[in-house]
Amino acid sequence: MWYALRSAWQSAKAKGNSATKILKERKNTFWTATVWSDEAAMRNFMLAPPHRIAMRKLLEWCDEAALVHWTQEHSELPDWIAAHARLQNEGRRSKVNHPSGAHIAYELPRPRPGRTGELRLK
């Protein structure tokens, strides 16, 4: 949880970030969504600590992880259900050392934004 929050705060402060939100669910499940001015700004964030450090730890800590990148005309964050649909249809698995069956099958449970805590940082 600490690395998820630190990475979200990092993204909100990063040059080129237009919006950041995080959703915490049961069983240490975290959803994050960010909007960037361009791909270079996003990559600069991805390669800088603490995000870079968290991604290295993800290999051992997580049994499921995925991501999706897309471009859009506006800088509004998508709702969690729309982001999930993109993730399911256009995303990819992240590498994890101990994948669950759901990770292997790329079966991503839908987020439940009304039941858990969402934090908008920007």
Image (cartoon, rainbow, N blue to C red):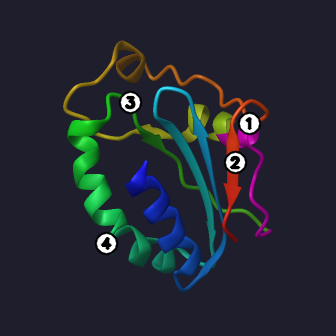
Among the two numbered marks 2 and 4 on one chain, the one whose residue lies closer to the N terminus: 4
Q: Nearer the viewer, mark 3 or mark 1?
A: 1
Tell me whether the residue at label 1 lies in contact with that at label 2, contact meaning CB atoms closer than 8 angstroms.
yes
Mark 4 surroundings: few (<14), some (14-19) or many (≥20) residues within 10 A: some
Could you tell me how far apart the alpha carbons at marks 3 and 4 are, in whole angstroms? 22 Å
Tell me the CA gap for discs 2 and 4: 23 Å
- Amino acid type at circle 4 is Pro
Farthest bottom residue? Answer: 15
Residue 81 included in the magenta stretch of the image: yes
User: In the displayed structure, does residue 31 sit left or right of residue 57?
Assistant: right
Alpha carbon distance from label 3 to label 1: 19 Å
Dot 3 amino acid type: Glu
Q: Position of residue 50 (x, y in %)?
A: 34, 68
Q: Which residues are magenta?
A: 74-83
The answer to which of marks 3 and 1 sits earlier in the sequence is: 3
Residue occupied by mark 2: 118
Q: Nearer the viewer, residue 65 or 39?
A: 65
Q: Which residue is mark 4?
A: 49
> Which numbered disc flags the more N-terminal residue, 3 or 4?
4
Q: Which residue is mark 1?
A: 113
Q: Earlier in the sequence, mark 2 or mark 3?
A: 3
